[in-house]
Image (cartoon, grey):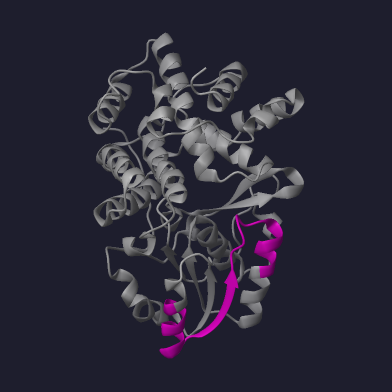
Amino acid sequence: MMSFGFSTPGKTLFGRGTADAIPEHVLGFGQRLLLVRGRSVARVDDIALDLQKKGAVLETVFAEGEPTVSQVIQVVKAGRDHRAQAVVAIGGGSAIDLGKAAAALIPSGSDLMDHLEVVGAGLPLTAQPLPLVAIPTTAGTGAEMTKNAVISVPDAALKVSLRDDRMYPTLAIVDPSLTDHAPREVTVSSGLDAVTQVIEPYLSSRANPLTDALCQPAIRMGLQAVATLIRHEDPDARDALAYVSMISGVALANAGLGAVHGLAGVIGGQTNLAHGLICANLLGPTLDMNFQRTATAGGNLERYSFLRQVISDVFDGWGDQSFLALSDVFELQGVPGLDDLLADNARVDGLIHDALNSSSMKANPVQLTEEDVRAILQMAVCPTA
């Protein structure tokens, strides 16, 4: 059997009702807390009030979209000025990433650019991060289970990671009830991001027996949950999708991702499109291209056959169609705005170059060419063409 390592957060609590015990767990790290939160879930107001009633001294900052370099600098300053003893991050992946970056940098005297990948020096952290409690309110990114924070760098039109083995949350609390009744478009796009994040590690060149054991059942569970939530609200499906999102974070942290996220990170850096929407539309075209290139090279197609069978089981009538048909299954019409980006050949050339050199692309199951990536982009714009 192959040799491999495996890493996860310090402790994880999963299940409905786990959010009720947030003060009990959080206040064990100290009273002076930096709360990094989103605005969309009203229940977070109750959690913040409960923390204060039980003795917490809060400094609250709101995540405004995906974290940027300037936002991270501001939040780190707020945490230092508050003399925060721990960070609590409640929200979607952006809020949790902002919280992870703050927890990593508050104890350090160094600058964010000293540690950012690609555009910065990529140096290890100079101090142990503050304790971090990560509590997701969406089911999609699995950010509560990973050791990196994705930061947007507008000046470079890129999204890059602040990454360190010490950045895993000290505690992850995953309560699916915090995702109940999320808007349908958010549910589908973020849910398909989670599904993508169990499919890509399963196909990854760095897959191992433990990530396989996690991803195989999660792929079916995630597809079934999204299929249900496309039609109607369902608490069991919410539970399943929250679990899949959690597992996706573990899987990607240990086996990497692939071309979907290699492209999505670059596209997201150049547009205002939601990450989940980009991933959802790229999934079918990328699976199709990886399958074709693997078949041409005489590679093992067993994992693609498994995916076909699962998709066919979940979506009656899908049969043995091309993976491109996933766009129709999920009622996707192509990435809005991506056609304008593709109209600029020089910009596309730069996008393809950056995607091929991204960290996610390194784990793709096959090596893709510039023309392969160009074809994926075109298929994402016109999935039925």
Q: Nearer the viewer, residue 241 or 27?
A: 241
Residue 64 is inside the magenta segment: yes
From the viewer's perspective, is residue 50 above or below residue 88?
Answer: below
The magenta segment is: 46-74
222, above or below 91, in the image: above
Magenta residue check for 178: no
Residue 118 seen in the figure: no
**What residue is at 28 percent from the left and 53 percent from the top?**
234
Using residue 221 as the reference point, say whether residue 345 is left or right of it: right
Q: Residue at x 46, y 71 (%)?
A: 42
Q: Going by the image, does 341 lie left or right of 194?
A: right
Q: Is residue 150 above or below residue 173?
A: above
Q: Is residue 111 left or right of residue 48?
A: right
Most distant residue in the front direction: 231
Residue sitting nearer the eye, 335 or 6: 335
Q: Position of residue 73 (x, y in %)?
A: 69, 65
What x and y, as percent, mark residue 358? 59, 35
Q: Residue at x 68, y 26 (%)?
A: 342
Q: Quadrant of the N terminus?
A: top left
Q: Residue 171: x percent and y percent?
A: 39, 67
Kindly tell me whether residue 185 is visible in this rendering: yes
- 135 vs 353, nearest the viewer: 135
Snapshot quadrant of residue 203: top left
Q: Residue at x 43, y 14 (%)?
A: 292
Q: How many circles with numbers are drawn on the protein? A: 0
In this rendering, the answer to whether 253 lies above or below 364 is below
Residue 368 at x, y percent in the picture: 54, 21
